[in-house]
Image (cartoon, helix red, strand yellow):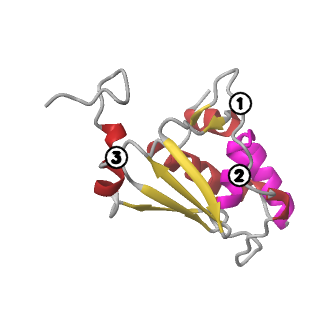
Amino acid sequence: MSESGELQQGRFTVDSRRVVHEEVDGEVIIVQLESGSYYSLGGSGPEVWELLVGGLTPREAAEAIAERHGDDAERIGGTVERLVEELRRERLILPRRPGDGAAPPLGDPAGRAVTGLNGFAEPVLERYTDMEDYLLIDPIHEVEAGGWPDVKRA
């Protein structure tokens, strides 16, 4: 199976040891704790994120969104796949293994209506690095392999 086929059929999860996320006023904010970068999902990104971390495959998410917006599942599938590739590249999601539980839902994706010219706005992932130094200064990052409170030796 090609990587594209794997992306469409695979399920993904959030690595809660390295990533935190929250919905704020219809926008999903994601922090990658290892890099200190934070992200904002715009357009239909919050809707796609909700469905992916809720356990749907990218293909299933695209079909659900297409039905919701009265749009073409094939076209939406391409945009969802590009977002999944970007989320994986940034280490915000990873393939779900058997036994992984679903992330707690952020809200009611069925009630979310994100519209663009044809009822669907392409998902947008914006990356911010201006707070990296502050997010990484946390003493939790400066520890030995055993974890806090064993501080790294100089």
First along the sequence among labels 1 and 2: 2
Q: Amino acid at mark 3?
A: Asp
Mark sitting on residue 101: 1
Q: Quadrant of residue 150?
A: top left
Q: Secondary structure at mark 2?
A: helix
Depth check, mark 1 against mark 2: the one in front is: 1
Q: Residue furthest front?
A: 149
Mark sitting on residue 142: none
Pointer 1 local density, CA inside 10 Å: few below 14, some 14–19, many at least 20 = few
Q: CA distance from mark 1 to mark 3?
A: 28 Å
Depth check, mark 1 against mark 3: the one in front is: 3
Q: Quadrant of residue 151?
A: top left
First along the sequence among labels 3 and 2: 2
As rendered, which of 46 and 60 lies closer to the eye?
46
Q: Position of residue 87 (x, y in %)?
A: 52, 47
Q: Amino acid at mark 1?
A: Gly
Stretch in magenta: 46-69
